[in-house]
Image (spheres, grey):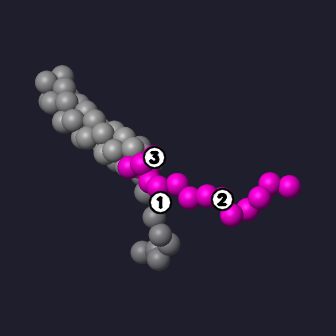
Amino acid sequence: MSNQPTEPNVSTIRDAARPPVADRAAFQTELDRLRVREKAHTREGDAIAAARRRLPMSKSIRRLR
């Protein structure tokens, strides 16, 4: 028996990186859910940007030379 570490099987590593196979209906369902989340994320980012634009301004202390 050897104490040397065994290297993982290359096909096992390659297969682990692949997403599971699904039918078109399951894929479309997950895609629709993801789009809802993406749109909510975009709206939140837009709201944050709008709030940033509404922040009060201050006069710059530094003068241009």
Residue located beneath label 3 in the image: 53
- Considering only order in the chain, which callout, 1 or 2, is on the residue closer to the N terminus? 1
Residue located beneath label 2 in the image: 60
The location of residue 8, given as percent across then percent down, is 43, 57
Q: As rendered, which of 20 and 40 lies closer to the eye?
A: 40
Q: As rendered, which of 46 and 63 lies closer to the eye?
A: 63
| Viewport quadrant of the N terminus | bottom left
Which amino acid does the dot numbered 1 rest on? Answer: Glu
Counting the numbered discs, the total is 3
- Residue drawn at the location 46% of the way across and 74% of the way down: 2
Q: Is any atom of residue 29 visible in this view?
A: yes
Q: Which residues are magenta?
A: 51-65
The location of residue 33, given as percent across then percent down, is 18, 36
Q: Residues within 10 Å of mark 1 (few under 14, many from 20)?
A: few
Which amino acid does the dot numbered 3 rest on? Answer: Arg
Which amino acid does the dot numbered 2 rest on? Answer: Ser
Secondary structure, mark 1, is loop
